[in-house]
Amino acid sequence: MTELPIHVKKPVYYGIVFLIIAILMGVAAVYQPIISLMGMVVLLLLALSVHNPEIVSYPVLISTAISINYIITANVGGIEIISLYKLGILILLIPCMLQNGLRLKFVYPIAAFTIMLFLTIFFSDWHPKMTTSLTFKAFIGLTLPFFFLMIKWKRETAKRHIQILCLLPLISVATGIVLQLAHVYSFLNVEFTGAVRVQGANIAPHLAMLAFLGITIALMESKREPERAKFYYCTLASNFAILIATGTRGPILAMLAMVVYYFYDMVKAYIKGKLILIIPLVCSLALISGAVYVQWDNMTKRSFERETGTGIDLSGRTEAWTYFLKGVQDSPLAGRGLGAVTVANDGSLYEGFVVPHNEYIRFYYDAGYIGCIALFFSLFIVFVMIYRVVPPRIKIYYAAFILAFFLYSFSDNTLSTVQFIIPFCWYLNGLYIQSTTNPNKEEVIR
């Protein structure tokens, strides 16, 4: 019997695999049409990724502009839609990882989560609702974004990724308008306080995360790549308007240091003779003044409508932080187990507090002092490695960006929300690539 040549075997094998998957999707359409439709999209993208892995990275990155788990509430076999989403994007990017390779010097955060997993299995005081499957599900979900930090993209691809990152909030808003017109999902969210918040194709806090990244990335890129400053100034302005419209306070406070330095830098350059900078300076001040005027009522409703012990309404965070800290006080070294925080709320807290909205408390609860310190120290190592290679003109901006991340982590789920951690890791990777490769050649400078 004649054996098929290798170049013929591959298409045959791929064809058989795709045919089997297509049949399964057809059967699934009878029971879960939405899930089946998503599966077909993934199948088509997977077929494309086999032939052109780089091009699939664009729709994968753009997909982070949508909080799919809030728009589609279905699950398959007890598996949540967000878990299927993460699995799908991992499958789609495997060809990219195989083709381009991984930068293993950035593996430290994954190593830290592995330490947490080890602590959970052998030393943690397991929460009564903890299961082994929950632990491994948490481990996979938390480590996944850090694989995107390590992919060795081509320089031009990384450049396009950075531009897409600045457009994600606008993509979310545009998608949200379409979903509102189709009566699928509400574009606005009205809280019990009366505050009206824009949420686009997300919930308001997730859209705020995208806007926060869009603003801070645009600030840095306008300084790193001044020839494209117009594009970044435009996206910066639109993203700031979106952030204000979400009525979210945490990201605004987190990036204050970066914004203050931006104005200081701009005024200093203006005094030195760069008179053209008066235009973005005046526009920035006008935008901020207008935003404060428009959103003042919303912000006061969210901050002072309810009387609290702290004087400022933190949307139940202080009560949640106290609850979770109390729950881990008997096992401070190794915590209650990786993923335990997601089942810790016994109903005495508002149901929205599946996690504490504070990543330091979250990982302290899951893995104690040992795991929490290992994680944030590993992140610090990665941040320093990138700091060493970024151009001198943006080093202070980059340091302020990292400071904003650490501050933001005090009030929200920066490491466990798709809309923050995946774009965040993607940008750090892109920034490193742009800072260490020759513009004319794909070769490492240092």
Image (cartoon, rainbow, N blue to C red):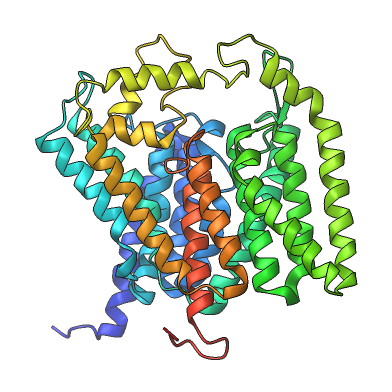
Q: Residue at x 40, y 51 (%)?
A: 88
Judge whether 267 appears above or below 297 on screen.
below
Residue 126 percent location from the top left of the image: 17, 25
- Looking at the rendered image, the quarter that the C terminus falls into is bottom left
Q: Is residue 331 left or right of residue 251?
A: left
Residue 412 percent location from the top left of the image: 50, 35
Please identify the residue farthest to the bottom as the structure is shown: 440
On the image, which quarter does residue 279 sit in? bottom right
Judge whether 440 appears above or below 31 on screen.
below
On the image, which quarter does residue 342 sit in? top left
Judge whether 436 appears above or below 166 on screen.
below
Q: Residue at x 48, y 42 (%)?
A: 414
- Total labels drawn: 0
> In this rendering, does residue 159 appear at all?
yes
Residue 90 percent location from the top left of the image: 38, 55
Q: Residue at x 29, y 54 (%)?
A: 110
Residue 112 percent location from the top left of the image: 26, 50
- Comparing 364 with 261, the one in front is 261
- Comparing 185 with 192, the one in front is 192
> In this rendering, does residue 22 appear at all?
no
- Comparing 40 with 83, the one in front is 83
Q: Residue at x 74, y 58 (%)?
A: 264
Please identify the residue farthest to the left as the structure is shown: 122
- Comparing 231 with 279, the one in front is 279
- Looking at the rendered image, the quarter that the N terminus falls into is bottom left
